[in-house]
Image (cartoon, coloured by chain):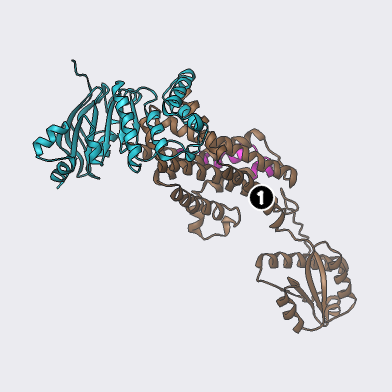
Amino acid sequence: MKTFAAFVRKEFKHIFRDRKTLIILFGMPIVMVIMFGFAIRTEISNSRIAILDHAKDAHSQKLKGKIAASEYFNVVAELNSEEEIGEIFKRGDVKLVLVFPQEFGKDLVNTKHSPIQIITDASDPNTANILSSYLQATFQSYVNEELHLQAPNLNITTRMMFNPENKSVYMFVPGVMTIILMLVSALMTSITVAKEKEIGTMEILLVSPLKPFVIILGKIIPYLVLALIIACTILLLGLYVFDMPMNGSYYLLFGEIFLFVLCALVLGLLISTVANSQQTAMLISMMALMLPSILLSGFIFPISSMPIPLQVISNAIPAKWFIIVIKNIMLKGTGFEAIAFETGVLVFITCLLTLIAIKKFKIRLE
Amino acid sequence: MEEEKVIEVKNLSKHFGKFKAVDDISFDVKKGEVFGFLGANGAGKTTAIKMLTGIWSSTSGQATVAGFDINKNRNKLKENIGYMSQKFSLYEDLTFKENVRFYGGIYGLSNKEIKLKTEEMIEHLELDNIQNTMISDIPLGWKQKIAFSVAVIHRPKIVFLDEPTSGVDPITRRQFWDLIYETAESGITVFVTTHYMDEAEYCDRISMMVQGRIEALGSLDELLTKHQAKNMDEVFVKLAR
């Protein structure tokens, strides 16, 4: 026990001596959450659009008024001809142009059917899509109000449960937490073990009476503590700066965080059994862990729209399961029953990795 | 005078597939001896050391180190040996004192013992001014001496030095050998590998490994007479050819 304490004390000294890494470790999650939270938004507000009105009648005027009054759009230009559309897009002034046809009002009243044209700047397809669907919804509601159209006798009301305002922060806080925990746990442990190999102290440790198990535990525990502190930081930011809801149990949440961190730590150890230098360890962690965790976890790109092979691969990525788990706990407030399967998968992956890591470690000793 | 054997090796081998890294070697090392373990790069020195220090298990043969079987009693064995490698083995981002504290700690020394040892080393190696300096800021020669003192901090029965003087200047090497002699005189057996042949001449007995086998074993004079050579360089060239 005393030897173990000596080991852990040394590890903490390494961490605190390395100020630069420490600042990056704590700075990065904060910067990432703030960046993702404020800058990248899937909801829109005050988007700049232009209108080309060939009709200039009562209905088109009223509709323009409604669009201008909405918080989503900011009408910055009234165009006079088709030629101006191309120009205004090229200047990048607006992301969308709405075109009313000549007979807009008349057709609308008589045939209850009048086309309007929405032209978007699809060099930014996401924004274009969202803007276009917001505008269509505005148009639909105008038609319903003005003409009391009940035509297809159904009234579809969409309710966005668990995230009524479609806030991107709700997506990004769990995502960023996952990525950062993966990074701190896997990358840092693999680097610290590789460092011992690189400077030759690993040999000394193996010759010492310390058991390999104690060495591994001594490497893991400091980073476990660090990862949990960072998880708390991200949670606090999410809850108090971005008003992220927390509807579930904190015990459950931290239990799952603990499990995920453990999984990542074991992954880090596994990498370190292969990598003999810090650079190799970093490269492997980045390529084999970070990229899949970001791209295949459903953090940014929805898994359901990936090609089947990638969907299958995504099942092997712990980050995918962890993101589902946190979202369930925080947004939906579900208990353990609802996430038992995901938790089971995480436990399974962790156990499997531990077995492989132990085996690899032994082979190296033989 | 009774000669106590600290290392006894009988027919020890280590095979990696078909490659025989260590091929049936046998030798003894006596207590308090400075034993030179020589060989060209790739001759199997490191493999042999890894087996004798309990990191790797052997393929066949037997060996005891400090009285403990290298395969069956590794934990006891590890408590009774010290080790210093050619790669530098102190933590650069810790101070001298912190390094001593760590290595003392993992060998199970009490805080009191560690404090005592630290003071002893400061006095002996004249470290007054640098005891709280990061190891990275201390000159290499000094580091090497500190590393050696740390390797024997728990008073092991035997200390393994794997090319301890590679890359240091001749004066420091000379000082380092003074330390080695001092240690041997205090009763700690020294098992040292080197590829400086002049250093081999400082050893009480020398063994020479060629392609996994021990081709020569004896005191300097014995080897020189047997191989009709003027110095170890010639012996080495004759054997390694």
Identify which residue is drawn at 34% across, 38% down: B171
For disc 1, the neighbor class at 10 Å (few under 14, some 14 to 19, many from 20) is few
* Secondary element type, mark 1: helix
Chain designation of label 1 = A
Does residue A151 appear to the left or right of A187 in the view shown?
A: right
Q: Which residues are magenta?
A: A327-351
The quarter of the picture where residue A92 lies is bottom right
**Quick check: is A189 in the magenta stretch?**
no
Question: Which residue is identified by label 1?
Answer: A31
Compare residues B36 and A248 and report the one nearer the observer.
B36
Decide: is A304 above or below B98.
below
* Residue lying at 60% horizontally and 37% vertically, measured from the top left: A228
Colour brown maps to chain: A
Chain letter, cyan: B
Does A140 sit above or below residue B83? below
Q: Is residue A193 left or right of residue B77?
A: right
Expressed as whole percent of the image width and height from the top left, the position of residue A309 reads: 48, 58
Residue lying at 41% horizontally and 41% vertically, measured from the top left: A199
